[in-house]
Image: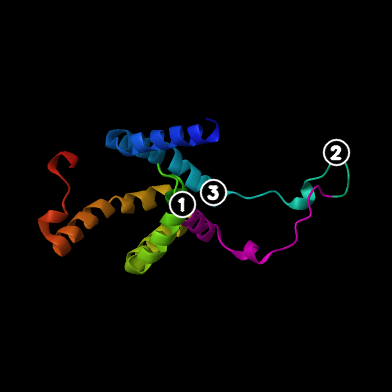
Amino acid sequence: TGTGGLMESIGHFIYKIEHMPQTVGLVWLLSSAIYTTYATNAFLEYKAPPLSARTNSGDKKPLLQIPAHKWSSVTRPTLLTLCRFGGSLLLGLVVHADFRVWERVVETARAAPHFLFPAACLFTANFSNAISLHRIGISLTYTSKCAIPLITVVLALCMDGPKALPHGLAL
């Protein structure tokens, strides 16, 4: 059945994964613990060699000549935050069992006004974290981030009461 069969198989696989919370949780934990920390720091600390140093075996002419662009003044923490949010948006719209991307785009646009404040808070938190990692380093940043789950639970309890807590087995 060609491409249709492949898309259906991929959709079925994604659907099965979405309904396996232990697998999703384990993959998230491992990817966060092992990869995310390294990738974030590598992104923030990356320094490209000067373009003039990239030449073909003794040629004086650089391999690439990239004109200065207005984006070159954007800081690494800003780029990291934009990449994270842009990547999350694209994954949320595209990676889904039913592949109805346009419907999710419309639904997301309709729901966006309801989430502007929380989204702005999340963006600010991620941006502040990126700045902190870039300037201070991993130890202090992640030590202070450890309080986030506790603060989240306390705020949820204060705002929504005990119904905000997950099921006891999840705790």
Amino acid type, mark 1: Val
Percent of width and height locating residue 39: 50, 43
Q: Earlier in the sequence, mark 2 or mark 1?
A: 2
Tag 1 and tag 3, C-beta contact below 8 Å: no
User: Disc number at residue 43?
Assistant: 3
Position of residue 145 relative to residue 160, above or below, is: above
Percent of width and height locating residue 1: 52, 30
Amino acid type, mark 3: Phe
In the image, 139 versus 47, the foreground residue is 47
Name the residue rendered at 79%, 55% in the picture. 65
User: Disc number at residue 41?
Assistant: none
In reply to whether residue 22 is colored magenta, the answer given is no
Mark whose residue sits in front, 2 or 1 = 1
Q: How is the image coloured?
A: rainbow
Name the residue rendered at 34%, 34% in the picture. 16
Mark whose residue sits in front, 1 or 3 = 1
What residue is disc 2 on?
57
In the image, 45 versus 159, the foreground residue is 159
Marks 1/3: CA–CA distance: 29 Å
Tag 2 and tag 1, C-beta contact below 8 Å: no
Q: Earlier in the sequence, mark 1 or mark 3?
A: 3
In reply to whether residue 84 is colored magenta, the answer given is yes
Marks 2/1: CA–CA distance: 47 Å
Position of residue 66 relative to residue 9, above or below, is: below
Circle 2: element type: loop
Query: Badge 1: how crowded within 10 Å, few (<14), some, or many (20+)?
Result: some
Residue interval drawn in magenta: 62-88
Magenta stretch mostly in which secondary structure? helix
Circle 1: element type: helix
What residue is disc 1 on?
101
